[in-house]
Amino acid sequence: MALYLTGFADEAADDLAGQIRATKELGWSNIEARKIDGQNIHDLPEPAFETACRQLEEAGVRINCFGSTIANWGKSVLDPMDVTLGEVRRAIPRMKRLGTKLVRIMSFAVLKGRGPEDQEAEERFRRLREICTMFTDEGLLPVHENCMNYGGMGWTYTLRLIENVPGLKLVFDTGNPVTSADRTQPEPCPKQSAWTFYEHVREHVVYIHIKDATIGPEGKTRFTYPGEGDGDVRPIVRDLLARGYEGGISIEPHLAVVFHDASVTSPADVRYRNYVEYGRRMMKLIDEERAALG
């Protein structure tokens, strides 16, 4: 498999038709499915899911990864697991229906008011082992994202997940470290280094999310085009290319909409244009880094 580009096309449009249009305008043939008409792909009513399947088939566009909400930052490891198991059970047959192998998962929200070593780690490992086994038994590959979750507290926590959860691989997000406290360091924790995080976990990375951002002097996050922030996008892409990476690179611009922040909205045409422009800049950046390597 050669390196390919994809993206969270729900940042281009709410409806699947708009997501497909943006994907094809970029010359791509993959979408990382998250929301369609406001619902995650594993939560769509069955008729809506079947309609989506037909649209994708007619357009010649495939879903390369389910951007699921399984074990994400909206779920506590202290809560019953019913919701999470329901999401897994719904995702599996839909992934098989679409021929999708990858599913993005997380490791439950960080427990507020507790230190990094008081995060119910063993219970997280137990739950993720159950989740991963459900997927791997069906020939599907769960990939953990370093986000607002246990594994996202720092690279050492991600490696603990790898050590304790057989079959788990990683999707590395370049932008998340920029805005995340490095819980491997004493209080007051500095922000993480994307490169340092990536360098320590790259042997387990099979998929990439591209975000980029800076933190202003007032502490406010500003998302940027790839390579213009502090997410070390260029050196990470250069290293991936040098190492012969052959997986997906998925854009998640956050320039016009932010999945976890409903206050960040933009008119439909602005969202669409930003997504396409982000994709074009990402392709240019990859070409430049490839040329630099000779």
Image (cartoon, helix red, strand yellow):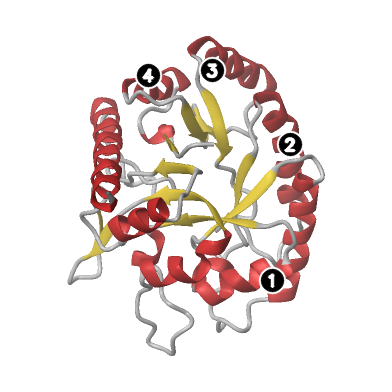
Q: Nearer the viewer, mark 2 or mark 1?
A: 1
Marks 1/4 in contact by CB < 8 Å: the verdict is no
Q: Nearer the viewer, residue 208 or 15?
A: 208
User: Which circle marks residue 21 in the picture?
Assistant: 4
Q: What separation in Å lies between label 2 and label 1 (alpha carbons)?
A: 24 Å
State whether residue 94 is above or below residue 58: below
Residue in the image at 33% along x and 55% along y:
238
Q: Which residue is disc 1 drawn over?
A: 163
Residue 17 in picture, x, y percent from top left: 43, 17
Q: Amino acid at mark 1?
A: Glu
- N-terminal of the pair, mark 1 or mark 4, is 4
Give the residue number, with chain letter if any, for mark 3.
56
Q: Earlier in the sequence, mark 4 or mark 3?
A: 4
| Residue 112 image position (x, y, % from top left) | 54, 74
Check contact, mark 1 vs mark 3: CB within 8 A. no
Q: Earlier in the sequence, mark 4 or mark 2?
A: 4
Q: Residue 92, labelled with which disc? A: 2
Q: Secondary structure at mark 3?
A: helix
For the residue carrying disc 2, how many other residues have a C-alpha within 10 Å: few (<14), some (14-19), or many (20+)?
Answer: many
First-in-chain label (3 vs 2):
3
